[in-house]
Image: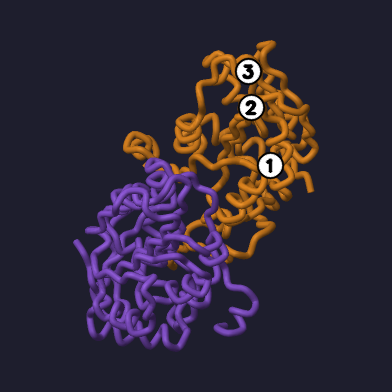
Chain colours: A purple, B orange
Amino acid sequence: MKQNIYDNSDFFAGYKELRDNKLGLNEVIEEPAIRALLPALHDKSILDLGCGFGTFEEFALEQGAANILAIDISEKMLALARERIRDTRVSFVRQALEDFVPARHEFDLAISSLCLHYIDDVGALFARIASSLKPHGQFVFSIEHPMCTSLLDGWAKDHAENKRHWPVDRYFEEGVRISHWFVDGVIKYHRTIDTYVRLLANTGFQITALVEPRPEERQLAERP
Amino acid sequence: MKQNIYDNSDFFAGYKELRDNKLGLNEVIEEPAIRALLPALHDKSILDLGCGFGTFEEFALEQGAANILAIDISEKMLALARERIRDTRVSFVRQALEDFVPARHEFDLAISSLCLHYIDDVGALFARIASSLKPHGQFVFSIEHPMCTSLLDGWAKDHAENKRHWPVDRYFEEGVRISHWFVDGVIKYHRTIDTYVRLLANTGFQITALVEPRPEERQLAERP
């Protein structure tokens, strides 16, 4: 199933406000963590899967990327991205990642930020990403931590609404999780760390880093 | 601090009963999982860190291992191991893993089962293990999952003692965890998955597998 929740008006409004206010975990935790893992982008040919409104494209152009193919399923997100970024080095394409069929050996780097937990058959996508990379190409991606996708209800609280525990139940029960995030019915796919690592290894990727980013002091100060 | 909890009489009695009854997670989950990761042991020179009472040595000899250096801090565990295994291919050595200083490039394989969460400076130990391996040597180890060592209190239960959640709090707060396991004051060291992977990569290990073993149907039938 190809989900396009970002084109739901209520979802989009909520999400855009979150990102505009820089209150999301994207800016506070994900962005610094994934950028620390990136190779030098200068002169690189880059594939961005789930580009959203083009934050990465802006950064990669500043860094001198040669060209970027930026794919997203959401028309609303791409409209913002196109408005923000007018540069012939970036091609924005509206497509479900499930439909992405690359030319072979095209990119130096593939990137995907907080998107692949929306994809059911991620192993098939890993294979298409691998075949889209040049020899020694790199793939850097972030997902919601399986400790978060196993349940999607967040903190277990007591009767006075005090946070008591971060519950991680149903960890080994992989598959669909339906949650409320701005709107009802947001679908994510829970997979274990084991499964992600195995699928990557089976695809032929060599794993050089696995990071569980934590907020820095400065970030905690900005968003306690 | 070098902990020798296995030589505590009460701990030893409880632990031995658990293992004798094959009720521990060692037999039910850890053993099948780590054996599935092992290379062929025939003719291999093997280092076993935290050998306990020699379960692995028995298996490795059956598989035709050339020789095994088996290290443990506990006199009581080694006494059982020596009683069980009388074979010149195995050398049992009583030593804290913190004191292990290998000859260089000696072993084809290093193994450690459910032991390294007792070690404070595991990065230093990884480096000594790496230098003890031949070129292209392998290191296979298991630890308690960081989702277990982050707290050591197990299930969050309601007033009627029903299991409610598996709580994973204090995940990013690495360091000492003191628990009751047969006796008070058992010390384990909590580290994130991120930290284990980073220390291994920094040591020069290439990570080829990361497994979160789950019980098979048969195992669930044996221990529901």
Looking at the image, tell me whether mark 3 or mark 2 is earlier in sequence order.
2
How dense is the environment of label 1, judged by Cα within 10 Å: few (below 14), some, or many (20 and up)?
A: many
Residue B53's tag is 2
Residue at the spot of label 1:
B126
Label 3 and label 2 in one chain: yes
Q: Amino acid at mark 1?
A: Phe
SS for dot 3: helix
Q: Is residue B68 above or below residue A187?
A: above
Q: Position of residue B172 (x, y in %)?
A: 59, 64
Chain of the residue under label 1: B
Quarter of the rendering occupied by the C terminus of chain B: top left
Residue at the spot of label 3:
B84
Residue B30's tag is none
Q: Residue at x 67, y 44 (%)?
A: B203
Q: Is residue A154 above or below residue A9?
A: above
Q: Residue at x 44, y 47 (%)?
A: A197
Q: Is residue B38 visible?
A: yes
SS for dot 2: loop
Q: Quadrant of residue A181?
A: bottom left
